[in-house]
Amino acid sequence: MSAIGADELGALIRAMAERVASEREALNRLDAALGDGDHGTSINAAFAEAVAAIDALEQPSPSAVWLATAKALMNRMGGASGAIFGSFFLKGVANLRDIDRVSHNRMAGLLVSGLDSVKARGKARVGDKTMVDALAPAVAAFGAAADFGAAWAAAATAARAGAESTREMTAKLGRAKFLGERAIGHTDPGATTIALMFEAAHDWWKENKA
């Protein structure tokens, strides 16, 4: 498939929401080791709200789906994490205006702009033990692939590897930075969430579009 529309984008967000919901308690446990212990609960609620908002759209479009997701993550999740996760989606809304179909190349650019926004807002780089450790390699892998099917697969693999790499890192940002070496041995919950999102997208694509 060379391009996807609002329905497919909405389905991808729904798949992400379902995966996050299934891993809510596991994400909370990861967060309890490094932060407040509520990451799974808050991002699950935000994605659920995103799905509800998408379902309520009277005139779905790619930009409307992306904007609904951004708003839900920013407003329902709240705090620094909500702002950062939300900014990933919000940055790309302008790139989707006035189009009905999203090509692989446009989606790749969308992901790059989202990554740039996350890095600018959170000041994180690869190696800081944050979601960027999963997001950066996933975005690069997506863009290097030839089509949607290969892109979601490559991005999912790269995101999981990036998330797992945070296990041996000390944190340079957020609450976890105060733990010093005690953070070693714990995977960053934000990076794990990114891996879940890309894995869900890959699985949905494989089941419905391959």
Image: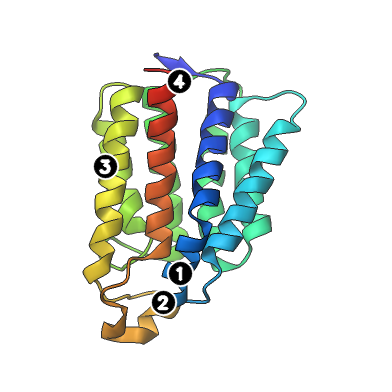
**Quadrant, the C terminus:** top left
The picture places residue 50, in percent across and down from the top left corner, at 65, 43
Mark 4 or 3, nearer chain start: 3
Mark 2 or 3, nearer chain start: 2
Residues under labels 2 and 3: Cα distance?
Answer: 25 Å
| Local SS, label 3 | helix
**Quadrant, the N terminus:** top left
Q: Is residue 210 left or right of residue 15?
A: left
Q: Residues within 10 Å of mark 3 (few under 14, many from 20)?
A: some
Residues under labels 1 and 2: Cα distance?
Answer: 7 Å
Q: Amino acid at mark 1?
A: Arg
The picture places residue 42, in percent across and down from the top left corner, at 60, 61
| Local SS, label 4 | helix
Mark 4 or 2, nearer chain start: 2
Q: Which residue is mark 4?
A: 208
- Image: 89 above or below 30: above
Mark 4 or 1, nearer chain start: 1
Q: Amino acid at mark 4?
A: Asn
Q: Which residue is mark 3?
A: 157
- Quarter of the image where one finds residue 77: bottom right
Q: Which mark is residue 118?
A: none
| Local SS, label 1 | helix
Q: Which residue is mark 2?
A: 33
At a point 38% along the width and 74% down the height, the residue shown is 173
Q: Which residue is mark 1?
A: 29
Q: Answer yes or no: is residue 71 visible.
A: no
The picture places residue 170, in percent across and down from the top left corner, at 27, 76
